[in-house]
Amino acid sequence: MSSHIQRATELVAEAESVVVLTGAGMSAESGVPTFRDAQTGLWQRFAPEQLATEEAFRANPSMVWTWYVWRAMLVDSVDPNAGHHAIGTWQQHLAARDGSLTVATQNVDDLHERGGAQDVLHLHGSLHSYRCLECGTPGTFDPASTGITADQDFDHETFVPTVHCDHCELGVLRPNVVWFGESLPEQAFAAAVSALQQAQLVVVVGSSGLVQPAASLPLIAHEAGASLIEINPAATTLSDTADIYIPSTAAVALPELLADIV
Ligand code: OAD
């Protein structure tokens, strides 16, 4: 066991209120590409302003839908990794001892839930829910009905679902994710801030820390006196601030860190 992990296991053993903040690196070993990694990151292949904005959706709904349906199908085709399972087990372990563990993620996949975590705060929305572009009312849509599959390379526009909103009948459905320039879901963000203000320990896994306001969340807890552990194979702007920076991956470091619990 590395000395980083050994020191971190002591913090884990002492902490009764924990927040785990995750980004795209959390799901990388499940086979979901990150946004900014040099070889595989989605933003290396696609420009965010072409795909993750309301302007892009209004200008080219076919392209934006195709991208989100492809990602939903990709996520459905993969499994949670050992890191997701370790977090789920840790949450159950603390709950059984009157402690608490809150998971707040920038990820739009459902791998934390499938790894056993409950009440996950999705700060950037979900790939598996939809809402009206105009009035915001939730709507239903089955991405599998499009015929788009995970193994097909995302390279062209194949699909436009013009599903009208049942409520206002004017708008069409859009993915229920946070696009650039949009606010985070108020309830999820407030719940994350509240959990961070009370946390004894915060573990940040697999985020480049380049997208606000999620990137500032660990600092709220740090300023309130919480210990901070970061797990990321590449150092970030948070690494120097963290009490312990573990230069390893989610699926390797989390089970090691939680070996006494999981
Ligand atoms: P990024 O793609 O920016 O960063 C992924 C991070 O994960 C990097 O720091 C990698 O070093 C790290 N990483 C890679 N593999 C890992 C592994 N196996 N284990 C642990 N860490 C690993 O992803 P995010 O920080 O999540 O927003 O990106 C934030 C937001 O930017 C996303 O939610 C998305 C994107 O634009 C929107 O679409 C609004």
Image: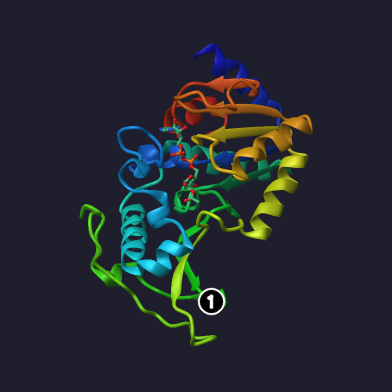
**Residue 17 visible at all:** yes
* Residue where numbered disc 1 is placed: 134
The residue tagged with tag 1: helix, strand or loop?
A: loop
Residue at the limit of the structure toward the top, as seen here: 3
Q: Which quarter of the figure has residue 33?
A: top left
Against 164, residue 188 (above or below) is above
Which residue lies at the image location 63% right of the left edge and 45% below the top edge? 213
Which is more toward the observer, 202 or 163? Answer: 163
Q: Is residue 222 left or right of residue 254?
A: right
Against 159, residue 208 (above or below) is above
Residue at the limit of the structure toward the left, as seen here: 152
Which residue lies at the image location 60% right of the left edge and 27% below the top edge? 238
**Residue 16 visible at all:** no
Which is more toward the observer, 207 or 78? Answer: 207
Percent x, y of residue 186: 67, 59
Percent x, y of residue 29: 37, 37
Total count of labels:
1
Against 15, residue 7 (above or below) is above
Q: Is residue 146 left or right of residue 253?
A: left
Which is more toward the observer, 210 or 47? Answer: 47
Can you tell me whether the CB of the residue at mark 1 lies under 8 Å from the nearest atom of ligand 1? no
Q: Which quarter of the figure has residue 50?
A: bottom left
Percent x, y of residue 222: 72, 31
What residue type is disc 1 on?
Glu
Q: Residues within 10 Å of mark 1 (few under 14, many from 20)?
A: some
Q: Which quarter of the figure has residue 154?
A: bottom left
Percent x, y of residue 135: 57, 77
Which residue lies at the image location 54% right of the left edge and 49% below the top edge? 117
Q: Is residue 139 left or right of residue 119?
A: left
Q: Is residue 170 left or right of residue 68?
A: right
